[in-house]
């Protein structure tokens, strides 16, 4: 090779080296229970992450029906039985993301592995699924707080992997998503302009059909709703006892929990956890 050309190539490599991602840590699925998928200019990579906490299914109150349905669906998947992709939708702080974390903590001994994908990295979803296809483990690919704006085309990659491609997802991969939106895409009044009545049947226009078609690819829909006061207080009691002791839950704590929810304008599992953190932390700070 010409020495001048060689020198120029080496100089070019020196300039672009800092743009390259660092060598990824290899994921060992015998050891690692979860990983993050990160897309970059050269493709994508899996980064192993430890479980965030020891949250268990028993810690999640007020969502018994949703827990049972998702656990049954996931256990069927782990045993090689038919199972559906799942969409967990509903109000903020109602336990959607917590249920996914608790599911991993509870079912990892049965073979569950979790890969989380950020919404902005969904364009690389087909590449991720291809990497997981030949693995001997079973994976839930999970996207938290999934929603799209009207101009966002990333949802097309998700639609394709769910049910659009000729091959479809492999039998060892299932997709779970959480969202505050039931149909994932924004809905506007103008979407209904194309709807019409044919006899007694309502036929949606193309805009509505396009938005429904994405969430419709999830076979299991689980709705999450705000807590009533009794369930909220039960959750507060649970977390106050977990973070502190049984003596920390008393009439004063109950009154403060109600005031806490009133000031925040709603009751939820997240709110119960936040109240318990504040209540126990303040009591311990003042030596109670």
Image (tube, rainbow, N blue to C red):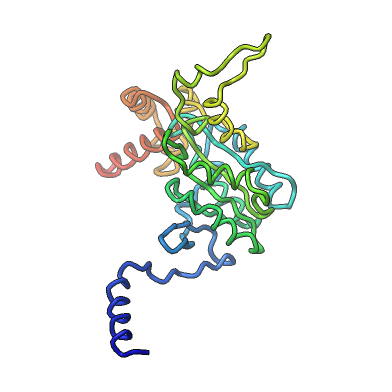
Residue 285 in the image: state x and y as whole percent: 26, 44
On screen, residue 102 versus residue 137, left or right, reads left
On screen, residue 122 versus residue 20, left or right, reads right
Which corner quadrant of the image does residue 114 belong to? bottom right
> Along the line of sight, which residue is nearer the eye, 125 or 33?
125
Numbered marks: total: 0
Rendered view: 17 above or below 185: below
- Farthest residue toward the top? 199
Identify the residue at horizontal 59%, vertical 33% (top origin): 213
Rendered view: 58 above or below 50: above
Residue 49 in the image: state x and y as whole percent: 46, 60
> Along the line of sight, which residue is nearer the eye, 82 or 103?
82
> Along the line of sight, which residue is nearer the eye, 276 or 180?
180
Rendered view: 181 above or below 102: above
Rendered view: 205 above or below 165: above
Q: Quadrant of the N terminus?
A: bottom left
Identify the residue at horizontal 45%, vertical 53% (top origin): 52
Q: Quadrant of the C terminus?
A: top left
Residue 208 in the image: state x and y as whole percent: 54, 25
- Farthest residue toward the front? 2
- Farthest residue toward the right? 81
- Farthest residue toward the left? 286
> Along the line of sight, which residue is nearer the eye, 202 or 235?
202
Residue 287 in the image: state x and y as whole percent: 27, 43
């Amino acid at each position: 090779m010409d020495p001048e050309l060689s020198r120029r190539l080496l100089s070019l490599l020196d300039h672009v080296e800092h743009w390259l991602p660092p060598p990824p840590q290899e994921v060992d699925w015998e050891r690692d229970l979860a990983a993050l998928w990160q897309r970059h200019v050269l493709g994508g990579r899996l980064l192993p992450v430890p479980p965030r906490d020891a949250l268990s299914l028993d810690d999640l109150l007020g969502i018994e029906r949703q827990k049972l349905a998702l656990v049954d669906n996931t256990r069927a998947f782990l045993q090689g039985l038919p199972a559906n992709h799942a969409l967990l939708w509903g109000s903020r702080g109602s336990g959607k993301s917590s249920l996914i974390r608790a599911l991993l903590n509870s079912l990892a001994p049965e073979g569950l592995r979790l890969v989380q994908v950020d919404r902005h990295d969904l364009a690389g979803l087909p590449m991720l699924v291809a990497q997981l296809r030949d693995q001997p483990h079973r994976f839930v690919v999970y996207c938290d707080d999934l929603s799209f704006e009207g101009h966002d085309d990333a949802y097309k990659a998700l639609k394709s992997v769910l049910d659009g491609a000729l091959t479809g997802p492999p039998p060892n991969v299932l997709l779970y998503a959480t969202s505050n939106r039931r149909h994932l895409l924004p809905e506007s009044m103008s979407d209904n302009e194309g709807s019409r009545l044919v006899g007694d049947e309502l036929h949606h226009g193309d805009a509505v059909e396009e938005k429904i078609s994405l969430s419709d690819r999830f076979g299991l829909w689980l709705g999450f709703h705000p807590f009533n006061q009794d369930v909220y207080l039960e959750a507060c009691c649970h977390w106050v006892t977990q973070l502190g002791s049984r003596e920390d839950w008393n009439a004063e704590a109950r009154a403060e929990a109600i005031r806490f929810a009133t000031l925040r304008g709603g009751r939820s599992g997240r709110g119960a956890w936040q109240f318990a953190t504040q209540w126990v932390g303040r009591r311990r700070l003042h030596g109670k």
